Image (tube, helix red, strand yellow):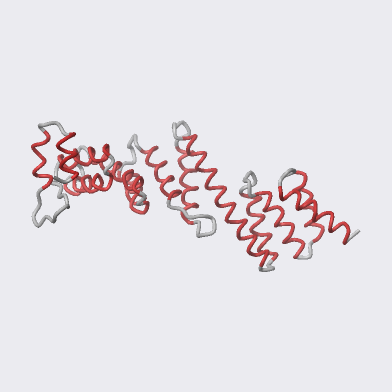
Amino acid sequence: MSKFSKVLRRSLPSAAGIALAALLAGCGATAGVVHYAPGEEAFVAGKELYQTGDLGECARALKAYLDATPGGPNAEEASYLIGVAYSRLGQHTMAQVELRHFLDVYPASPRLPEVEYQLALSYWEDSRPAAYDQEKTVYARAQVQRFLVLYPESPRVPDAKKLLEATRDRLAEKEVLNARLYTHLKQPGSVVFHAQKVLTEFADSPWAAEALYLKGLGLEEWGKDAEARQAWELLVKEKSGTEWAERAREKLARTALEHP
């Protein structure tokens, strides 16, 4: 007996068991593949599978329901569960398609706040470390900002704020990595550009101290010694106790000896 058959036999009421044969039947069925009959039985099966954690089969059953009855009485819930199931499975491209589809089709749904949050979370979980392209991080940041504007009273707000902070820190880290790279490449204009981007957009990030130090290095390499000293003096003043403040003190002491 397949896992799906066992789940249905154990968990569905006896009356619902009548639909079991229809759910497992299908022309040209292959071993181990469940074919879902179009109708409410597919929705019942899909919801049960969601509750038991069989998310891949859950999505298949609910899609069978929606394909057959796109305007059915449980279409909204089915669409929502499919998006969340894909997200929990780590199939984020599919999750994002389904969640955006839900937002388009059900603009008055009471589930909108949760779907907006789940979409932001899916973008974030689909994003890559700072050394790589940050397209999905940018999407996550924009989506969570949208959520916070639209639903400031949602119980998800504390989680959303943590998510926003994580996206901001990742993007700040990316800019610092860019500034480091251009420091090694001896391209001071680019160093200053990327460092200043951190200081302008992510001033409260833990990466701001290094960004300010790197900005000083870029300005020094650029021949703008007075502005470099100003950057390091500001770093010592505002980020005292950090590794980068200590490095800035050393630079200031060295430049004082070199240019008394």
Q: Which is nearer the eye, 209 or 231?
A: 209
> Which image quarter is the C terminus in?
bottom right
Q: Position of residue 158 (x, y in %)?
A: 49, 34
Q: Where is residue 246 in the image (x, y as percent from the top left)?
A: 76, 49
> Which image quarter is the N terminus in?
top left
**Image quadrant in which you'd find residue 204:** top right
In the drawing, does residue 9 fall left or right of residue 172? left
Q: Which is nearer the eye, 192 or 12?
A: 12
Q: Where is residue 237 in the image (x, y as percent from the top left)?
A: 77, 44
Q: Where is residue 21 in the image (x, y as percent from the top left)?
A: 8, 43
Q: Which is nearer the eye, 131 or 84?
A: 131
In the drawing, does residue 121 fall left or right of residue 193? left
Residue at image location 37% in from the left, 41% down from the top: 115
Residue at image location 16% in from the left, 49% down from the top: 34
Residue 200 vertical placement versus 44 (above, below): below
**Image quadrant in which you'd find residue 10:** top left
Which residue reaches farthest right?
Answer: 260
In the drawing, does residue 216 fall left or right of residue 61? right
**How many numbered callouts?**
0
